[in-house]
C-alpha cells in the first residue's frame, strides 16, 4: 500500500503495534523513569469504589548527582469527584506542593507522602477530609477481614457482629501511635524506607485501602521532586509499580460499564450494516460504489467496538489486555478512522454520484486528510498504550488533538466547494430546480458534519470533566450514540432512491 509517496507494509504496521502494546501494563502499571528533571509527574488517575485498593511501590530511587538527605521528594494523592484539571498543580508551577502545603485549598482531600531520606522514613500527612483514610505499609498489613468478605449465608449473618467488632478494634489500633495515644489523624503514621547501599538507592511501598463509601472518589497520584523547582535540578532514576483495582475488578469505577456498552453498540452497528446491505441488494435504483464503502465502514465500526469490548474484558479480569485482541482492535480502529474520513470526503465531492473523476482540489484534500488521519490514529494508539507519567504522553496527546482538529476542518472543504458550485450552477445552467434540491441536501450534510464534530469532540470533553467519576462511561455512550445517529442520517440522506436529488443526472434537453 502506498500513501503520499510512502510505502506502508502491513507487516511493519503489525510490528509497530506489537512494540507499542508491549510497553503497556494497563491497570497494573510499571513505569521506568530515567534522567528525569520534571517538577512533578502525573502517575495515575483511577476511580475507586468501596473496598478498592491502590498499591504503590517505589523501586531503586536514586539521583544524579546523588540525593542529599535534605532534599525533599514524595507523592501526593488527591481525591476529587470529577476528572477536571488539578487546580493547585496547574496554577502554582513555581512552588513544590510538599513544602508549600498552603497551596491545598481548605476543601481539598489529599494525602502527602514525604520521603525523609535522613531518617529512612516515609512520612504521611493528610488534610482534614482524608484524616482517617486507611493507609498500610503493604498489602499483607491489611486486616484479612477487609480483603475477604463472606457471602450472605446463615453462618456469616451470625458472625457479622463479631467481625464488625474485630474490624473496629483493628481500626482503633491502627489509629494509635507508638506512645499508646490515639492519633486523631494520619500525621503520626510512618512507613519505613529500605536503603540499598550497593546501588545507593531507596525502596518503599504504601497501600491505600478504600474501606468506606465516604472514601470513594477519583484518586490522582503524583510524584514530586522539590529540588527541580530550584536552580539546581536533579536527574532522577526510579521504577514505579502501581496496581489499582476495585475488589478484584481492574477497571476504574467509571469504566466498569464499558465492556457491555461496547458489545451492545457493536451488535447495533452490525444489525444496521446488515439492514443497509439488504437495502442495497433489493434496491431497484442505481447503487454506487460509495454505498458499498458505507457498508464496509459500518462493519469496521462494529468489529472495532467488538474487539474493544473484548480488550476491556481482559483488562477487567486480569489487569492487562491480551496482545492479540488489542492488535485486532487497533487495526480495525485505524481502518475505521481512515475509511470514515474517506467516505465523508467522497460524499462531499460527489464522487460516483455526479462525477467519476476527482478534481485536483479533491485529490489534494485526500493527500492531506489520509496521512493526517493515519497520524491521528497512531497518536491515539500510543496515548492509550503509554503510561500517564511517560515524558512523551503529553506530547502525543497534543499531537492527537491538533491533528484531529485539522482533519475535522479539512473534511468540510469539499462540502463547501460543492455548495458553492451548486449555487453558481443554479443560476447559469438552466436546471435550477435540481441544483437547488442538491444544494439543500449538501447544506444539510454540512450541518450534520459540523454537529458530529462538535458533539463527539467538544461536548464529550465537557462531559468528561463535569460528570461524577462513576459516570465517566456516559461520555463514551454519548460519543457512540452520536456516531450511530450520524451514520443513520447519512445513510438515509444518500440512500439509493429515485427521488433523491443527489442521484439525479442532469440529462434534460
Image (tube, rainbow, N blue to C red):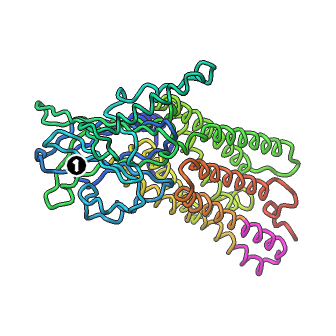
State whether residue 12 appears in this view.
Answer: no
Prevailing secondary structure of the magenta residues = helix
Visible in this render: residue 295?
A: yes
| Side of 26 where 95 appears, left or right | left
Residue 203 left/right relative to 160: left
Residue 434 shown in magenta: yes
Task: Answer with the quarter of the image where residue 161 lies.
Answer: top right
Percent across and percent down for residue 305 are 62, 40
Q: Is residue 415 left or right of residue 149?
A: right
Residue drawn 51% across and 25% down?
162
According to the picture, the residue beneath numbered tag 1 turns out to be 73
Q: Where are the magenta residues, as a range?
A: 421-444
Front residue of 306 and 44? 44
Q: Is residue 237 above or below residue 444?
A: above
- The x and y percentages for residue 210 are 45, 39
x, y percent for residue 283: 86, 47
Amino acid at each position: 500500500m502506498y500513501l503520499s509517496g510512502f510505502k506502508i507494509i502491513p507487516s511493519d504496521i503489525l510490528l509497530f503495534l506489537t512494540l507499542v502494546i508491549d510497553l503497556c501494563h494497563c491497570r497494573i502499571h510499571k513505569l521506568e523513569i530515567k534522567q528525569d528533571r520534571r517538577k512533578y509527574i502525573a502517575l495515575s488517575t483511577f476511580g475507586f469504589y468501596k473496598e478498592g485498593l491502590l498499591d504503590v511501590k517505589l523501586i531503586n530511587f536514586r539521583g544524579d548527582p546523588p540525593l542529599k538527605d535534605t532534599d525533599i521528594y514524595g507523592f501526593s494523592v488527591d481525591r476529587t469527584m470529577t476528572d477536571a484539571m488539578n487546580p493547585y498543580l496547574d496554577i502554582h508551577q513555581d512552588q513544590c506542593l510538599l513544602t508549600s502545603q498552603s497551596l491545598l485549598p481548605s476543601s481539598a482531600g489529599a494525602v502527602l507522602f514525604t520521603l525523609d531520606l535522613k531518617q529512612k522514613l516515609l512520612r504521611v500527612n493528610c488534610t482534614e477530609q482524608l484524616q482517617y483514610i486507611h493507609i498500610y505499609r503493604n498489602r499483607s498489613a491489611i486486616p484479612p477481614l477487609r480483603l475477604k468478605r463472606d457471602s450472605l449465608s446463615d453462618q456469616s449473618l451470625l458472625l457479622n457482629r463479631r467481625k464488625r467488632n474485630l474490624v473496629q478494634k483493628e481500626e482503633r489500633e491502627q489509629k494509635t501511635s507508638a506512645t499508646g495515644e490515639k492519633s486523631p489523624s494520619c500525621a503520626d503514621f510512618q512507613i519505613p524506607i529500605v536503603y540499598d547501599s550497593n546501588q545507593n538507592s531507596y525502596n518503599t511501598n504504601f497501600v491505600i485501602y478504600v474501606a468506606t463509601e465516604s472514601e470513594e472518589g477519583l484518586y490522582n497520584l503524583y510524584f514530586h521532586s522539590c529540588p527541580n523547582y530550584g536552580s539546581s535540578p536533579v536527574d532522577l532514576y526510579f521504577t514505579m509499580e502501581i496496581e489499582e483495582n476495585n475488589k478484584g475488578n481492574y477497571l476504574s469505577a467509571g469504566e466498569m460499564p464499558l465492556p457491555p456498552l461496547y458489545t451492545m453498540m457493536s451488535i447495533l452497528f452490525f444489525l444496521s450494516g446488515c439492514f443497509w446491505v439488504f437495502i442495497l441488494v433489493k434496491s431497484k435504483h442505481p447503487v454506487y460504489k460509495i454505498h458499498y464503502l458505507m457498508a464496509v465502514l459500518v462493519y469496521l465500526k462494529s468489529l472495532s467496538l467488538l474487539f474493544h469490548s473484548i480488550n476491556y474484558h481482559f483488562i477487567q479480569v486480569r489487569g492487562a489486555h491480551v496482545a492479540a485482541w488489542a492488535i485486532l482492535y487497533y487495526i480495525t480502529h485505524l481502518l475505521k478512522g481512515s475509511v470514515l474520513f474517506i467516505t465523508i470526503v467522497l460524499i462531499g465531492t460527489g464522487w460516483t454520484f455526479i462525477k467519476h473523476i476527482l478534481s485536483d482540489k479533491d485529490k489534494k484534500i485526500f493527500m492531506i486528510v489520509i496521512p493526517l488521519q493515519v497520524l491521528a490514529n497512531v497518536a491515539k494508539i500510543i496515548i492509550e498504550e503509554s503510561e500517564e507519567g511517560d515524558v512523551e504522553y503529553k506530547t502525543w496527546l497534543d499531537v492527537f488533538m491538533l491533528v484531529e482538529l485539522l482533519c475535522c476542518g479539512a473534511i468540510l472543504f469539499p462540502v463547501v466547494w460543492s455548495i458553492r458550485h451548486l449555487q453558481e450552477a443554479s443560476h447559469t445552467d438552466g436546471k435550477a430546480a435540481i441544483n437547488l434540491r442538491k444544494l439543500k441536501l449538501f447544506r444539510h450534510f454540512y450541518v450534520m458534519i459540523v454537529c458530529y464534530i462538535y458533539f463527539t469532540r467538544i461536548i464529550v470533553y465537557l462531559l468528561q470533566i463535569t460528570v461524577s467519576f462513576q459516570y465517566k462511561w456516559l461520555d463514551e455512550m454519548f460519543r457512540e450514540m452520536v456516531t450511530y445517529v450520524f451514520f443513520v442520517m447519512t445513510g438515509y440522506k444518500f440512500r439509493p432512491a429515485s427521488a433523491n436529488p443527489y442521484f439525479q443526472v442532469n440529462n434534460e434537453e
